[in-house]
Image: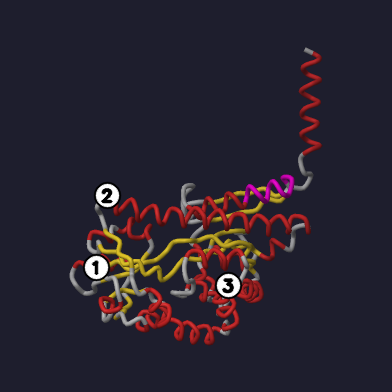
């Protein structure tokens, strides 16, 4: 009995010696459950940061919008309160950073390989610097990877079939400008009204990624998917700079390393899930995908609008850097 008690005491003492004396708990937030790509990206961030820091960084991730929505997370991080890390859409950063919405511009990326190369080569660094200066929030990694295509009630495979196509776009003015440039006929309609608008003939098309098509059952009214691949989502992992500055230099390095790792896993998961969802819906006979044969023409028509928009945002240099990535 004495030997086993002594052994237990020795183990507990060893555990105490090995454990960090001052652990820092970081609070995270995500709108989704454990299975979502964003949550998986944040879990990878936590894993790498914990391992790298030897356990001095611990994590408390609140899921399912428990701490509000992405815009709330970002505002909290900017103020240095309540939330330390989260995945946040660039559109929710625009209140602080004029340049951030460039990340969401249609036709910013030539294809999935170009999108991944931009992330890996850190071509978005000037946008991240502007967010840091304007909002006091660091962008430490880039998740995302949903590819947006046209959802149409008839096959659209070329410029002639696209011309004058009545379609729904999101409210940001750049969306209307881009789709007008590629010769469609865009109009802004609330997201929850899209299904009915196609069903009643108000519009013939909308645009979304596979998860949205599946969730909203858009395939019931728009079963023909034109693979325009006009946008690939960028969803940064954001980290409060007020929190970052309180960490030790070693912990800061761990946060940056973990942010890149979390972003990479998030991109791999979401881009893989996106194509898989489309394939599954097509195999089930819910929709039919159509290659868009003149995609090079779409890129050509969009380029002047992209450049004008980048100039308005003061981000022409960033657009040029992104275009130059091979």
- Neighbor class of circle 1 (other Cα within 10 Å; few <14, some 14-19, many 20+) is some
Q: How far separated are the C-alphas under marks 2 and 1?
A: 18 Å
User: Picture quarter containing residue 211?
Assistant: bottom left
Q: Is mark 2 on a helix, strand or loop?
A: loop
Q: Is the Cβ of the residue at disc 3 closer than 8 Å to that at disc 1?
A: no
Disc on the earlier residue, 2 or 3: 2
**Which residue carries the number 1 mark?**
155
User: Is residue 116 visible to us here?
Assistant: yes
User: Is residue 72 visible to us here?
Assistant: no
**Which residue carries the number 3 mark?**
325
Q: What stretch is highlighted in magenta?
A: 46-55
Residue 223 horizontal/vertical position (percent)? 25, 61
Which quadrant, please, contains the C terminus? bottom right
Residue 267 horizontal/vertical position (percent)? 52, 58
Query: Which numbered marker is on residue 292?
Result: none
Judged by depth in the image, the label closer to the viewer, 2 or 3, is 3
Residue at point 74%, 45% (across, down)? 54
**Main secondary-structure element of the magenta-colored stretch:** helix
In the depicted view, which residue is nearer to us: 170 or 276? 276
Residue 268 horizontal/vertical position (percent)? 51, 55
């Amino acid at each position: 009995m004495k030997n086993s008690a002594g052994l237990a005491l020795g183990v507990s003492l060893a555990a105490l010696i090995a454990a960090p004396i001052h652990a820092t708990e970081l609070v995270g937030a995500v709108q989704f459950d454990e299975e979502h790509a964003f949550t998986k990206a944040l879990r990878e961030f936590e894993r790498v940061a914990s391992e790298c820091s030897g356990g001095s960084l611990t994590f408390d991730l609140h899921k399912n919008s428990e701490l509000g929505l992405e815009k709330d997370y970002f505002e909290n991080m900017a103020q240095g309160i309540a939330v330390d890390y989260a995945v946040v859409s660039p559109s929710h950063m625009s209140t602080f950073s004029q340049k951030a919405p460039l990340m969401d511009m249609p036709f910013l990326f030539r294809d999935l390989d170009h999108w991944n190369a931009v992330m890996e080569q850190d071509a978005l660094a000037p946008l991240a610097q502007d967010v840091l200066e304007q909002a006091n929030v660091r962008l430490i990694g880039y998740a995302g990877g949903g590819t947006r295509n046209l959802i149409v009630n008839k096959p659209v495979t070329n410029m002639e079939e696209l011309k004058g196509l009545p379609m729904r776009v999101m409210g940001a003015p750049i969306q209307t400008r881009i789709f007008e440039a590629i010769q469609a006929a865009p109009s802004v309609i609330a997201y929850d009204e899209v299904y009915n608008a196609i069903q009643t003939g108000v519009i013939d098309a909308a645009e979304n990624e596979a998860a949205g098509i599946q969730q909203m059952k858009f395939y019931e009214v728009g079963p023909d998917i034109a693979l325009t691949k006009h946008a690939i989502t960028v969803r940064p992992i954001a980290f409060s700079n007020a929190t970052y500055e309180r960490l030790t230099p070693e912990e800061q390095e761990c946060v940056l390393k973990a942010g890149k790792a979390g972003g990479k896993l998030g991109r791999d998961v979401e881009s893989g899930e996106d194509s898989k969802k489309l394939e599954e819906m097509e195999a089930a006979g819910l929709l039919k995908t159509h290659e868009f044969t003149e995609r090079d023409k779409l890129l050509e028509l969009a380029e002047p609008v992209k450049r004008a928009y980048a100039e308005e945002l003061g981000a022409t240099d960033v657009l040029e850097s992104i275009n130059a990535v091979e």
